[in-house]
Image (cartoon, rainbow, N blue to C red):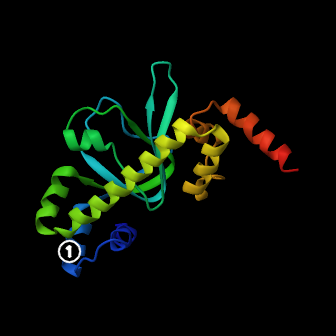
Amino acid sequence: MNTFQLLQNIAKHIQLSETEQDSVAEAFNSSTIKKKQVLVQEGSVHHFTSFVVSGCLRLYAIDKNGYEHILQFAPTGWWMGDIRSLLTGEPGALNIDALEDSVIMTIEKSVLDKLYQSIPALERFFRILAENSLATYQHRLIDNLSLAAADRYKNFCKRYPTLIEQLPQKQIAAYIGVTPEFMSKMLAHKQQKNK
């Protein structure tokens, strides 16, 4: 199983005893997701949260015109889930799929809730993740409301430095809220300016 990276990620914020580490490792399931494979589809209830051991996932919505709006990428070492659906048990409005072959560790919400009872420090860990996620989303919302596309692209490069070369421009464009055509023109203009 791929629990080493998972436990290392948790250890960045809390300390677990060996017994607690074993309990956490047993509670997660490992799976391989192929590129373009859908993990969660809009309209379904999301019952689990995922840790990316390797690869990259994306969380996105599709508007009424069929355009994708990417809310988050989860490269190696990141967490992902449709939090609203997970917490409310209601069908979600988001999709999650793999941008490349990925290995993930998942835990069902019901199993996680039981772990919170036996390992209270885990609640602290997931609270820290939730706080960091909320801060990131607030910062991104302000960026989207107040920054030009070129500045949003710079912030993307800071937030996801490993993904700049890894992802197609189309995916980055959907994240910063521009069309792929506009993205190409923007980058070409930036390149000409830098000459």
Q: Where does residue 145 sit, x and y in percent of width and height? A: 52, 36
Residue at position x 43%, y 58% in the image:
78
Of the pair 45 and 34, the residue shown nearer to us: 45
Which part of the image, by quadrant, shows the N terminus? bottom left
Q: Amino acid at mark 1?
A: Glu
Of the pair 143 and 120, the residue shown nearer to us: 143
Q: Where does residue 40 sit, x and y in percent of width and height? A: 35, 39
In the drawing, does residue 50 fall left or right of residue 184? Answer: left
Q: Where does residue 60 sit, x and y in percent of width and height? A: 44, 37
Residue at position x 61%, y 37% in the image:
173
Q: Report the residue that reaches farthest toward the right.
A: 195
* Residue 34 visible in the current orientation: no
Residue at position x 60%, y 42% in the image:
172
* Residue 176 visible in the current orientation: yes
Query: What is the number of callouts on the image?
Result: 1
Q: Is residue 18 above or below residue 128?
A: below
Q: Is residue 87 above or below residue 78?
A: above
Q: Where does residue 41 sit, x and y in percent of width and height? A: 36, 34
Residue at position x 60%, y 44% in the image:
152
For disc 1, the marked residue is 20
- SS at mark 1 in the image: helix
Of the pair 136 and 181, the residue shown nearer to us: 136
Q: Is residue 187 above or below residue 13?
A: above
In the drawing, does residue 153 fall left or right of residue 136? Answer: right
Q: Quadrant of residue 79?
A: bottom left
Q: Quadrant of residue 190?
A: top right
In the drawing, does residue 181 fall left or right of residue 23? Answer: right
